[in-house]
Amino acid sequence: MRMQSISENSPINLTDSAPNALTHLDSDGQAQMVDVSAKPITAREAVAQGEVWMALETLEAILAGNSPKGDVLGTARLAGIMGAKQTSALIPLCHPLPIHKVEVQIVPDTELPGFRITATVRIKGETGVEMEALTAVSVAALTLYDMAKALDKNMEIRQILLLKKTGGKSGDYVRSVSNSEF
């Protein structure tokens, strides 16, 4: 599939109201924040997941509390929560949202070996929280890496993805592809 560039001479109507229209672009192709003021306030939730792969010895050291920087998992969990709350400051066209709940779970998995990070974000608002859930996972994973890099610089952050979202005009979404199919 050939990508078409956006220019002043582009025949594409960028503000078309079609279901797949590019809503973050104005009629001149310039980035804009979408006006969500006319949307109804609804309950919305998003769940994202990611993984941090590492040597089994690193996983064991983190679980035993033997990291030079201290509480790796507690710090990563709090960083993920803080990241969700700062999403609009990090991603230019995201709206600042009145987040009601952020939950970050970091679970060891010896089969990776490493940790699976899951973030759930909830609001009542005019727009979704998918980016907040994805940001929470990303920041938690980056913090876990930072806290444990003295033990293992070969760690890998992998498969950050949206698992599900509920609420809003587009309806509910549940990921249909399992992580093992990547």
Image (cartoon, helix red, strand yellow):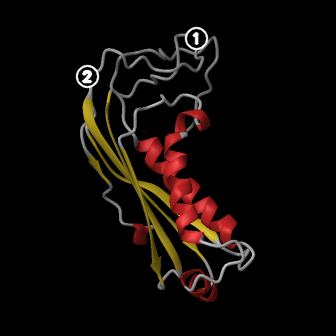
- The x and y percentages for residue 85 are 50, 41
Task: Quadrant for residue 153, please give it.
Answer: bottom right
Q: Is mark 2 in CB contact (under 8 Å) with mark 1? A: no
Closest to the observer, 141 or 177: 141
Kind of residue at badge 2: Pro
Kind of residue at badge 1: Asp
Q: Is residue 153 above or below residue 8?
A: below
Badge 1 local density, few (<14 within 10 Å), some, or many (20+)? some
Q: Is residue 57 above or below residue 46?
A: below
**CA distance separating discs 2 and 1:** 28 Å
Question: For the residue labelled by badge 1, is the local secondary structure a helix, a strand or a loop?
Answer: loop
Which residue is rendered at x = 45% and y = 55% of the image?
161
Task: Quadrant for residue 167, please give it.
Answer: top left
Closest to the observer, 144 or 154: 144
Is residue 128 toward the left or the right of residue 53 in the image?
Answer: left
- The x and y percentages for residue 46 are 35, 47
Q: Earlier in the sequence, mark 2 or mark 1?
A: 1
Which residue position holds label 2? Answer: 40
Q: Is residue 111 above or below residue 160?
A: below
Is residue 3 toward the left or the right of residue 166 in the image?
Answer: right
Is residue 75 toward the left or the right of residue 111 in the image?
Answer: right
Which residue is rendered at x = 47% and y = 78% of the image?
108
Front disc: 2 or 1 = 2
Q: Return the mark for residue 28.
A: 1
Which residue is rendered at x = 61% and y = 66% of the image?
144
Which residue is rendered at x = 72% and y = 72% of the image?
149
- The x and y percentages for residue 8 are 64, 11
Is residue 107 toward the left or the right of residue 151 in the image?
Answer: left
Badge 2 local density, few (<14 within 10 Å), some, or many (20+)? few
- The x and y percentages for residue 101 are 36, 46
